[in-house]
Amino acid sequence: MDVISETFSVKNTADVVLDLTYTKHGPVVYTDTTHLKAYAVRCAWLEPGGSPYLASLRMDQASSWDEFRDACSYSHIPGENMIWADKDGNIGWQAVGIAPIRTNFSGLVPVPGDGTYEWDGYLPILDKPHEFNPKSGFLATANQNVTPDNYEFWNAISYTWSDPYRGDRVNEVLSTGQQMTMSDMKSLQMDYTSLPARNLIPYLKDNDLSSKALKAYQLLSQWDFKLEPKSKAAAIYVTWENTIKKLMNTLVIPSDVKPFFSGLQMKKVMDIIELPDTMFKSQTSLTKQAFITNTFESAVKELTTILGPNMSAWSYGQSQFKHAYLQHSLGEIVNDSLKQVLKSTLFI
């Protein structure tokens, strides 16, 4: 591959010299000196003339669905979902983003830069998935895969998406046919329902559990599957889910590729768990019952170590577990009594 090297100096207390190396496929991000290979990354949305977010100005001025879609055609950003709604009750969805066409490779792994693997131009944005006034009466996107199965241009569409559960939950709530109020929509925006929890917890029924694990299961069996602050069941479930993912990664991901994987997505984990028992064992080397029991017992032990032996002290969102605290830079000038007032009136 053609390599261009550029050197520049930055004046400070001392001269700093950096060598920046490029190819026609983008900047070199790694050089393997042992095997004499350089790895470059080409980024479509940084192509000259892209001005990725300026298309939003056109969208803001659109007065019809057609004008909105035309504005979307300039949106040379990474893939996103754009939603349209107007005062006449029309709704629409247009997937946007500059999408290179790869005719003989997926783009998921490095390929030789010798010309045998090149982009075949870009898919016109208006050819990306879209929908107008669907029969369902609503549109729901939450970074899940919303590409129709019969879509034609898969050689310009991604292969990876977020877990589907947020989108599934939105679809579940909106598909009831209930007339949604502003309050309902605000509640949906802040909905903490865990769909994997709803499917996983029944697998614990009738398992041979220790007395403490059985007590933890009883809390889960009465739970509404909402990951809310101060919930004991939520703390138990999240720890169990994390334990499930860790063990599944250990059992399923081949050892030679483990260094390159952060882990399986929860959807893939659930797909394996929901296989018939014999197929589950063939993939994990454990029976499903043993897998469920072992991970749950381990989760209870972990919580005992983190939060203490008293289960009544276990709760989701406490300072020792799944807790985030954001403080404004001016927060220290507020006295303690006013802090308590603000905390009780403004924050949950």
Image (cartoon, grey):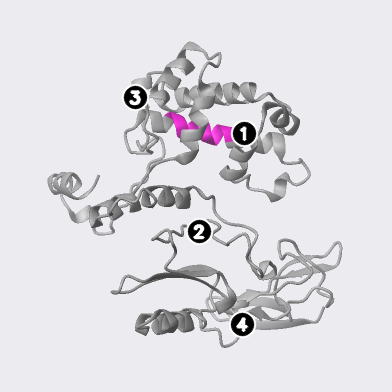
**Distance in Å between CA atoms under marks 3 and 1:** 30 Å
Q: Which residue is mark 3?
A: 313
Give the residue type at disc 1.
Answer: Ile
CB contact under 8 Å: marks 3 and 2? no
Q: Which residue is mark 1?
A: 273
**Distance in Å between CA atoms under marks 2 and 1:** 23 Å
Q: Which residue is most to the top? A: 211
Q: Which mark is residue 230?
A: none
Which element is circle 1 on? helix
Q: Which residue is mark 2?
A: 143
Which element is circle 4 on? loop
Name the residue rendered at 49%, 23% in the picture: 300
Q: Is residue 71 above or below residue 277?
A: below
- Examine the rendering and report whether any part of residue 54 can be seen: no
**Distance in Å between CA atoms under marks 3 and 2:** 35 Å
Q: Earlier in the sequence, mark 3 or mark 2?
A: 2
Density class for disc 2 (Cα within 10 Å; few <14, some 14-19, many ≥20) is some
Q: Which residue is most to the bottom? A: 49
